[in-house]
Amino acid sequence: MTGTPTRVFVARLAGIAVFDPAGDQIGRVRDVVVMLRPHPRPPRVLGLVVEVPPHRLVFLPITRVTNIDAGAVIFDGRINMRRFEKRSSETLALGEMLDRRVVLADSGEQVVVVDLGMEQSRTRDWLITKVAVRRSGTRPAGRGNGGRLSLRRRRGETFVVDWDAISGFSLGEEGQGADSLIAAFEQMRAPDLANVVHELSAKRRAEVAAALDDQRLADVLEELPEDDQVEILGKLDADRAADVLEEMGPDDAADLLGELPPEQREQLLALMQPEEAAPLRRLLSYADNTAGGMMTTEPVIVPPDATVAEALAQIRNSDLNPALAAQVYVCRPPTEMPTGRYLGTVHFQRLLRDPPPTLVSAICDTELDPLRPELPLEAVASYLATYNLVSVPIVDENGRLLGSVTVDDVLDHLLPDDWRENVMDDTTTDETDEEEEALRGAEAARADEEGDAR
């Protein structure tokens, strides 16, 4: 591996690009697969878990990696696209080893693993030889080697030790945190992080959920399959579950609430702020595959006396998804749901063409009629396709705006109910990779032999 550093810390590999010899990117690193061995022998690195489009995790043997640096991994161009499945003898360095509580062998002090350093040996094997750990408290002063007084360490101090300087690495331990794992994937987009979370054990999913802040957890929940959503929400205490639901998009929150038992649903709605719970109750009153069941209650709404400059300021909000930011709806006050009478739509391209002082009421499109909440999914999809729209307003019998349906809402409902899980759990098989099988099989056998010898 010419040019590869002598030591690589695995948390720094999270999310970096993987390139073939021609310089084409084929995916991003999501984890490192290792084989734990009897203590004090260091774990052996078997390969990398690489995410390739669309959200498929595959195994890249470490023997095929030709270079690792701070910004990229380069491999020899051969990779098996069969979906990665972790074997019982294998461990994920990021997903399972970070945040583990271990013990310093020389002092008996308990510390937390924050990173792992892997190095290439003289035999060209990659081994986990270093462990970056963090103290969670202050160690009492005492006598070290030679009777010298040991120094007090600062609370929260991070330092690196050899692998054989730690013990008690039990993967079954309860109460493992997730701060280091989350830090490793801090820059990851919510759909990609959701794919990582989906691959974790139920125990680790709960720990990651507990460590994420409410907004980040809400973003991840929106991208997970329904079974994962229900499982994670059910492991949060009721107050926090209500807080997370408030951070989710109303349509996604309503869909999730619809999957819960009625008693749990009502408990969570009662714990939410009334102004947050009210739109969810309205959405839950509509059938799932109707305009009302698909719509979001947070489109961009402006009064008729708003200017183009004011409308543009609203759609610049970075929290808006592109479909919602593509147009503003002009309604008479009040502008909260349900609004005053809906007057028309102004598309963002029109906003860009007109002078900032122009009133939106003078340029809004009134030719296309809004839709009613009872309209079925197929009719909504046909309407969007016919008029090349990315969003459509939904009004009640009195012409008051109730929400909008975006094209991504329609796609979500047109796809099979389990489409997210199918994408994440794609089990399409390819020809068996003999080198990969030999590497992983030989390591499992070697680990068994080492265990028997001990």
Image (cartoon, grey):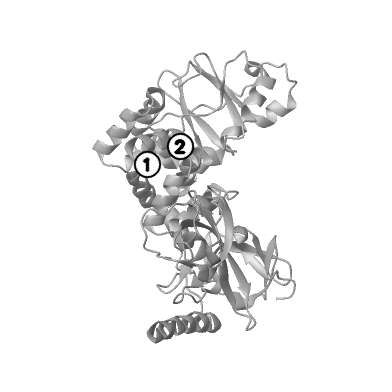
Q: Position of residue 276 (x, y in %)?
A: 41, 27
Residue displayed at 34% across by 33% down: 284
> Is 322 located above or below residue 30 in the figure?
above
Taking the view exactly as shown, the residue that stands out farthest to the front is 147
Could one spot residue 294 in this view of the protein?
Answer: no
Q: Quadrant of residue 200?
A: bottom left
Reading the chain from its start, which is encountered first: label 2 or label 1?
2
Q: Which mark is residue 248?
A: 2
Left or right position of 376 against 193: left
| 235 lies above or below 373 | below
**Amino acid at the residue labelled 2:** Met
Which residue is label 1 attached to?
256
Residue 83 at x, y percent in the picture: 49, 69
Does dot 1 land on a helix, a strand or a loop?
A: helix
**Dividing the image into 4 quarters, which one contains the C terminus?**
bottom left
The reply, left or right, for residue 285 in relation to residue 119 is left
Give the residue displayed 42% in from the left and 37% down from the top. Answer: 244
- Between 249 and 371, the one lying in front of the other is 249
Relative vertical location of residue 262 with respect to residue 78 in this rendering, above or below = above
Marks 2 & 1, CB-CB < 8 Å contact: yes
Judge whether 53 appears above or below 451 on screen. Answer: above
Counting from the top left corner in percent of width and height, residue 185 is at 56, 52
Q: CA distance from mark 2 to mark 1?
A: 10 Å
